Image (cartoon, rainbow, N blue to C red):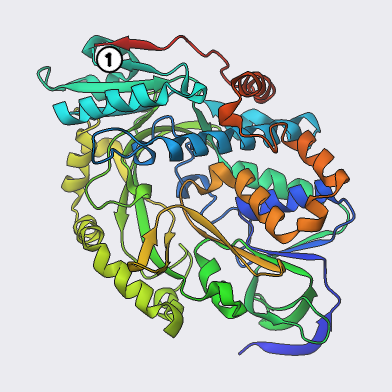
Amino acid sequence: MAKHTNTTEKGPDVVLIGAGIMSATLGVMLKELQPSITIEIYERLDSAAAESSDAWNNAGTGHSAFCELNYTPEREDGSVETAKAIKIAESFEQSKQFWAYLVEQGFLKDAPNFIRSIPHMSFVWGEDNVNYLHKRYDALQQNYLFHGMQYSEEPAQLAEWMPLVMEGRDPAQPVAATRMDIGTDVNFGALTRCLFEKLQQMDGVTMHFGYDVRDLWRSKSLGGWKIRVENLNDGKTRDVQTEFVFIGAGGGSLRLLEKSDIPESRGYGGFPVSGQWLKCTNRAVIEQHHAKVYGKASVGAPPMSVPHLDTRMIDGKQELLFGPYAGFSTKFLKSGSYLDLPKSIQLSNMAPMLMAGLHNIPLTRYLIQQVMQSPEDRLNALREYFPNAQMNDWELEIAGQRVQVIKKDEEEGGVLEFGTEVVSAADGSIAALLGASPGASTAVSIMLDLIKRCFPEQMNSADWQTKLKQMIPSYGQVLANNPELGQQLRRQTSEVLGLTTDEQTPEVTR
């Protein structure tokens, strides 16, 4: 049983719960905007970025909507919706601008350790899917953020782009692909650890590993919040006073948000989805593939389960992954408890969760099928993207847990939201991030939105506005509507980060 000390420590201005990419991004932004601010970070594990931000636990694509087909759904009239893709592409440009600023400031010294250029490709087969991909290509060409994309239905061209995908494939099968050379691979684990390493060296910042946040409540006497933390090494707990709390604990955020009891938290639920990869162990095979090749998701599949044959750089080595294969677990974190889901169910979210379940029966059916898969089933799924794949070249790797957001809906009763959502108190004293993909890739724009909500006065000050424009030169502008600025900034950030800069003339081969 935890031993509690009654003393409340005079705490920092800000407490960040969870040592992932979101907390790291927010912490760095706040210290840049207000160097005197004091921050404490509490992480239940013994290292940063060990859950959703870890390289083996997320896609690492640098989601910019170049290849992810779930961001460009086909409408009932056959046209392709591009608004979400454009927003995500713009958000990733903001992330790159912020990282480039940190590199130039010496805050991040070695960009190649966390971001590299790698082509982003979409690949489909079957006449209907080929027609869809061509329409998607045409629709995306209307915005300059996707200029440089190439489209081909020519098997010889596709074999040059992705030999493993085309070798052994039926030559009569209709196929098509798009290719974007300015795509990236991002090791968010490495980036997160770099950010925290630098943050810890700054005055007024303290990190606490091996501490679990057990409870939090409004402080009636002092204002702000009290956080009860338990030292997992000795079982002792203590209370910490703070003015602002950010809950960036991945799948653990929902339960802590519920404990806050702010009105805005009511009605939110979570649906956990687990994941697995097939990891290639044959270096000769790994070296033949140099792209992130994304396909179409199965009916009912969550966005995090869009299949991809994925070149990654992890710990300085090129890796090749396929998946992810989805599954169901009641855990909200990879290192969590099987009681996470039951404990998250309350009177305020029971109805939305039940209604969301009724509206997503195809998802339930899909997850059951995934859980029941044999090794042969996984190999057959891989062979749709790599026809000559051999079982003994691959091993199963456990990926991270994702908790999809369930929220109240006036018409449906409850809906399952795919994406990320910031929930904050009316007074801006506490905020939590819920959800999953595209998550890490859009961390900068998500944190900008959070700061705007929670620090409105400071955000409107001349000092913060000036600093924000230094950190993110496109801040305050709709980048998607400003080709001249966007292309200039894309070239500049690519140069600083050591990325491919060429935007080729759009190319179509049919």
Report x, y in % for residue 36: 90, 55
Q: Quadrant of residue 4?
A: bottom right
* In the image, residue 413 above or below residue 147: below
The residue depicted at 60 percent of the width and 35 percent of the height is 114
Please say whether residue 93 is visible from this viewpoint. yes
Q: Which residue is mark 1?
A: 159
Can you say whether 358 is above or below 69 in the image? below
x, y (%) of residue 369?
Answer: 19, 57
Of the pair 337 and 429, the residue shown nearer to us: 429
Identify the residue shown where x is 51% and y is 34%: 89
Place of residue 194 in the rendered image (x, y in percent of width and height, measured from the top left): 69, 43
Q: Quadrant of the C terminus?
A: top left
How many neighbours does mark 1 have within 10 angstroms: few (below 14), some (14-19), or many (20 or more)? few
The residue sitting at the left extreme is 172
For image coordinates 49% across by 26% down, the residue present is: 183
Report whether residue 118 is seen.
no
**In front of the other: 382 or 488:** 488
Q: In the image, residue 268 lies at what x, y percent?
A: 47, 71
The quarter of the rendered structure image containing the N terminus is bottom right
Q: Nearer the viewer, residue 377 or 493?
A: 493
Up the image or down, 139 lies above or below 108; here it is above
Q: Amino acid at mark 1?
A: Ala
Snapshot quadrant of residue 407: bottom left
Residue 440 or residue 406, whichever sits in front? 406
| Picture quadrant where residue 261 is located | bottom right
